Amino acid sequence: MSFPRAFTTGGLTLKSPYLLAPMEGVSDAGFRRVCAQAGAGLGYTEMVRARGIVKRNKSTLALVDTVDPEVPAGVQLLVVNERELRDTFEILAELSHSTHPHFSRIVAVDLNFGCPSSDVLRIGAGPAMLKRRAKLRAIFEALADVKRRAVLPSVASVSAKIRLGLNQSERAHKVYLPVVEMANDTLDHLTVHGRHAQQRSRDAPDWRAIGEAKAHSKIPVVGNGDVVTGADAQRMHQETGCDGVMIARAAIVDPCCFFALTGAPEPAPAAKLARIEAAFALLPPTRDKHREFREELLARLRAQASGQRVEARVPENAHLR
């Protein structure tokens, strides 16, 4: 059973089943271009708080950096209720006709129910929402409705990313399976991160749970956890039946990891460095965290290009949503 060569979600058919995760302080327009050149089928902005968009907060709106006309991009939203979601779509649509024309390039919207940070859990969002089934269904139905009505016409795919629950108890009670059932008749695909919210990135993901979700799903399921090579992606596909893979950790270590995943020949270190420098020069960082990440990544790649051995440093959960 070979891994799919493409991925279809809603009205989007992507050339690759490998998606770039919405990583805080990492997934800006320049980084998404680099990963698209290396074989990513779609990249997402870092998590954007819908509440900030509703308030027209300038720094929040800046995170919706779909400014690259050559690379399809989705926006990942953190929402707390269906009203906030509907208002967010209305504002994005309004601004796409005036001050923020690049909002008309948003091709996908993903809802974040996987972020384990304490400030997200404190407001009852992210993984804390998974057992609140009535509220979650209302949000899913609102997302399906705004897509159906083409409130933001460019959006061709709507989805959600979930964890296995808030803690081990919720994981044991499989709170994620009812979420799969809700997604079946509302969303275009579902991403399942194979950890609960109390687990850290270094903890082993549970691929069996992704397989359970896939067995209950009528829509494509994207596996998320710890895939770093094409062989790992193939094994995840064989064990879970997932239709795509979302990459986070491997992309931080080296954004050209998608060459290994897709089987394309990897460029020489100097060529790789030149490609990344060109993308970063063309698409400025959105905020200071992106700038700091770029500087660290380029320093590592320059050392590699000069023949030095460089140990990869993978940030903890603060960067991996």
Image (spheres, rainbow, N blue to C red):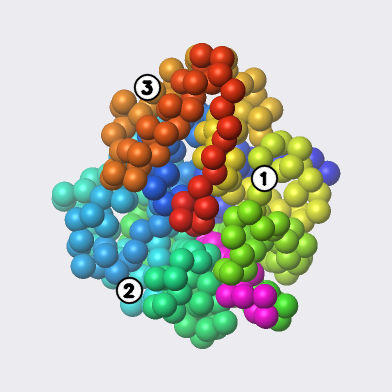
Mark 3 lies on a secondary structure that is helix
- Quarter of the image that includes the N terminus: top right
Residue 263, picture quadrant: top right
Marks 3 and 1, how far apart at CA = 27 Å
Binning the other alpha carbons within 10 Å of mark 2 as few (below 14), some (14 to 19) or many (20 upward) gives some
Per the image, the residue denoted by label 2 is 84
The answer to which of marks 2 and 1 sits earlier in the sequence is 2
Give the secondary structure at mark 1: loop
- Indicate the position of residue 188 as horizontal and vertical percent values: 56, 60
Seen in the image, is 274 located left or right of residue 311?
Answer: left
* Disc number lying in front (2 or 1): 1
Residue shown at the point (40%, 62%) measured from the top left? 77
Residue 60 image offset from top left, x and y in percent = 27, 57
First of labels 3, 1 by sequence position: 1
Numbered badge on residue 195? none
Residue 144 position, x and y percent, is: 46, 68
Q: Quadrant of residue 189?
A: bottom right
Q: Are marks 2 and 1 in contact (CB under 8 Å)?
A: no
Count of numbered tags = 3
* Rendered residue at 62%/43% (across/down): 17
**Residue type at the position of mark 3:** Ala
What kind of element bears circle 2? helix
Which of the numbered marks, if any, corresponds to residue 278?
Answer: 3
Whether pointer 3 and pointer 2 mark residues with C-beta atoms closer than 8 Å, the reply is no
* In the foreground, 1 or 132: 132
The disc label shown at residue 227, or none = 1
Of the numbered discs 3 and 2, the one sitting upstream in the chain is 2
What amino acid is at disc 1? Val
Q: Which residues are magenta?
A: 159-170
Q: Residues within 10 Å of mark 1 (few under 14, many from 20)?
A: many
